[in-house]
Image: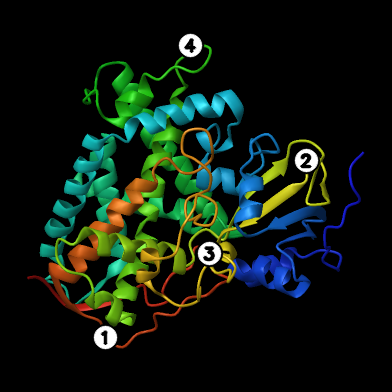
Amino acid sequence: MYQKNQMPKQSGLDHSAALLREGYLFISQSADDLRTNVFETRLLAQRAYCLRGHQAAALFYDTDKFYRQGVAPLPVRKTLFGEGGVQGLDDAAHRHRKALFMGLFTPDAEAQLSQLMREQLRFNAQGWATEAQVIWYQQAKQVLTQVACKWVGVPLAAEEVETRTEQLSQMYELAGEVGLSHFKGWRARSHAEQWIAGIVRQVRDSSLTVPAHTPLFQFCWHRDLEGELLSDQVVAVEVLNLLRPTVANAVWMAFAASALHQYPQAAATLQHGESHATQRFGQEVRRYYPFFPFTVAKVRHNFSWNEMLFAQDTLTLLDIYGTHHHPDEWHQPHQFNPQRYLSEKTSSFNFLAQGGGDYDQGHRCAGEWVTQIILAQTIDFLRHELDYQLPEQDLSYSFSQIPALPKSRVVMQRVSLK
């Protein structure tokens, strides 16, 4: 027998409109009103659970209690994740595919990515010096498209950069949109998958040679649990699962530039070559600013937790932004303070910028170190290698826009290498 369900419940017929309106703040505001970290609501005319905080996150990432296959809404799968990718797998299939991703992230790959990032920033900056002004977010997307393709092994001609940048960025920029904007993102993914699938076929028929150490090569010749090669389409999805999130780091790059400007005392602590301070600054960018609002799963089977009954197949949302700004998890969470990492402890369940739990068996993003490298290189480059001025502009952001971005996209003037 299960214990009596004492889960707080949000009143009202449906809260889908409130979720769209309030965005990143919906779960936390509702939880605060109910004085709880776990509550039941209704979304899209169905029961749903909302969770926040490290204890609830540890529950959410228990793969014996929650599953993810087929859970993400179709519009999100069609734009953000694609069909057949690692994010939608569970159990042995997920572990097998995840091992492929984990095998890509070697010390040599880390060093290569770090070098590619700095070289591309320096190269592109030569062109920025000729512009009256530079929209940093737009330039960051192009830098990351070029870096990601080089690192993954995907050929990218100079005349393709703008088109591929737009396709890769629309997949995450438009994933949460409705109507015609969403179909624009859907179309961008379709075109990008066709592009990569064509390259996969060239690799497999030997008309294109790529180095064996590259992720593209590894995916092309990876075999599933039945010993079969992945289809061209699934390989394309997984390759895009490296390219698309790498380009999405442009959001963090925009917020990093904003933070350097808005928090000069924190920026002043960054000394050239002092990696630990730079890493702390990058971590605080990832905690403080909004990126993913929440992640989703469904209850695998009926179970009771803290005298609350979770019913099988119920949609469950874990509040990422709310966990990062919960006063029970962080000291003065609404202050930007990189020094907090000298005294405050982080865990795989209270720092959720790219998922929670462990890398090997859980659903924490295998490429989290990619983001850390990109941010470290970006922060050091902006602070010590690039001269620029930020004119008066609106660096605020909307919590109802997903992903959130500085409204000005960070306008720079008088840009030059030092």
Residue at horizontal 52 percent and vertical 39 percent from the top: 82
C-alpha distance separating marks 4 and 1: 57 Å
- The residue under label 1 is 391
Is 201 positioned to the left or the right of 228 in the image? Answer: left
C-alpha distance separating marks 1 and 2: 51 Å
Is mark 4 in CB contact (under 8 Å) with mark 3? no
Query: Considering the numbered disc 1 on the image, is that residue within a helix, a strand or a loop?
Result: loop
Is 230 positioned to the left or the right of 374 in the image? Answer: right
Label 3, residues with CA under 10 Å away: few <14, some 14-19, many ≥20: many
**Camera-nearest label, 2 or 3:** 3
Query: Considering the numbered disc 2 on the image, is that residue within a helix, a strand or a loop?
Result: loop
Note whether 1 is above or below 175 in the view shown: above
Is 338 positioned to the left or the right of 7 in the image? Answer: left
Is 390 positioned to the left or the right of 292 in the image? Answer: left
Pick whichever of labels 1 and 3 is earlier in the sequence: 3
Pick whichever of labels 1 and 2 is earlier in the sequence: 2
Res 279 visible: yes
C-alpha distance separating marks 1 and 3: 30 Å
- The residue under label 4 is 227
Label 2, residues with CA under 10 Å away: few <14, some 14-19, many ≥20: some
Q: In which quarter of the view is residue 196 placed? A: top left
Q: Specify the amino acid type for callout 4.
A: Gly
- The residue under label 3 is 324
> At which x and y percent is residue 321?
55, 64
- The residue under label 2 is 313
> At which x and y percent is residue 299?
74, 41
* Of 74 and 302, the residue lying toward us: 302
